[in-house]
Image: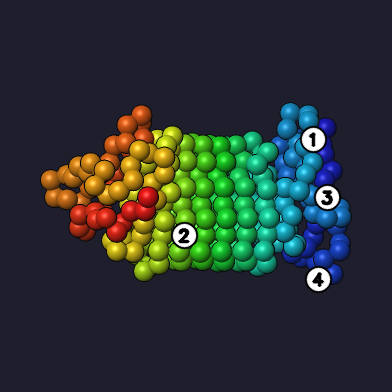
Amino acid sequence: MPLQLIILAAETDPSRDAKTVQTFLTADDLLTLEGDEKIAYFDGGKTRIGDLTDGEDSHDGYPGGFPSSTEVHGTRDDDDIDHFAVGIAQEIYGFAGNDTIWAGTSDDSIFGGIGDDEIYGGEGDDLVVGQDGDDFLFGDAGNDSLHAGDGADGLYGFGGNDWIFLTDDGDVDTIYFNVGDDADVIDNFEHGVDKVYLANLGVSAFGDLTIVYNADGTQAQIDFGGGDMLTFTGLEQALEAGDFLF
């Protein structure tokens, strides 16, 4: 049975009060309800309603306000996009502003945009891109790819075998690695600038680390045991005590 869903026409109507009715033929879509921009997600006949997109004039869908179950857009203001309950793969764009984004349980791609963002990948093998600003990126469960952009970023891979890509921008990016974070790869580590914070891994000083390099010194590996391992790629020199925090 077709669903008639009411969405907020914030991007197309200057008054930001008009509503548009869209009809979907499937039961896996997102919509914006009347009132305070709550989102209902239809999943297998069950309706979940919550503050899934709650930023000023945020909406689910393509630019211009057209609804989509797989693409989500924030605004130029500060947005809270909370899609933790969504079980389909999505592309989520925060755009400008200091955004907080929670992705769902599938393999999502999240782009923070301009501003100081906080992004949670959730379950699944996610792509998490901070872009401009001082961002905090959380891969959460799954084999994720975390990309720091311009700015001083904090990156947490958490469980799963994650790839962490850094940027030569002169800003201090900090990678947080804890027991149970599995085998992660750090690429383009900037010596004398970026830091790796090691927590609960049985090491308290640089001298406690056993670092194994490849033949040309461009890769290094630290095995903490129990499946927890850090591999550095694209190194220009050997790692030093100042590269780590304990």
Q: Quadrant of residue 212?
A: top left
In the rendered image of this protein, does residue 240 appear above or below residue 28? below
- Which residue shows up at 51% across the image and 66% down it? 133
For disc 4, the marked residue is: 14
In this view of the protein, can residue 85 be seen by the observer?
A: yes
Labelled disc at residue 47:
1
Q: Position of residue 83 (x, y in %)?
A: 67, 45
Mark count: 4
Q: In front: 86, or 29?
A: 86
**Distance from label 4 to label 2 (Cα)?**
36 Å
**Distance from label 3 to label 4 (Cα)?**
18 Å
Instruction: Tell me which numbered mark, 4 or 2, is placed earlier along the sequence.
Output: 4
Q: Position of residue 209 (x, y in %)?
A: 26, 43
The answer to whether residue 204 is left or right of residue 60 is left
Instruction: Tell me which numbered mark, 2 or 3, is placed earlier along the sequence.
Output: 3
Instruction: Tell me which numbered mark, 3 or 4, is placed earlier along the sequence.
Output: 4
Circle 1: residue type: Thr
- Label 1–label 4 contact, CB within 8 A: no
Circle 3: residue type: Leu
Task: For mark 3, give the secondary structure.
Answer: loop
**Distance from label 1 to label 4 (Cα)?**
30 Å
Task: For mark 4, give the secondary structure.
Answer: loop
- Which residue shows up at 71% across the image and 37% down it? 28
Q: Position of residue 124 (x, y in %)?
A: 53, 36
Q: In front: 106, or 186?
A: 186
Q: In front: 15, or 94?
A: 94
The answer to whether residue 15 is left or right of residue 209 is right
- Label 3–label 4 contact, CB within 8 A: no
The answer to whether residue 133 is left or right of residue 232 is right
For disc 3, the marked residue is: 33
For disc 2, the marked residue is: 153
In this view of the protein, can residue 31 be seen by the observer?
A: no
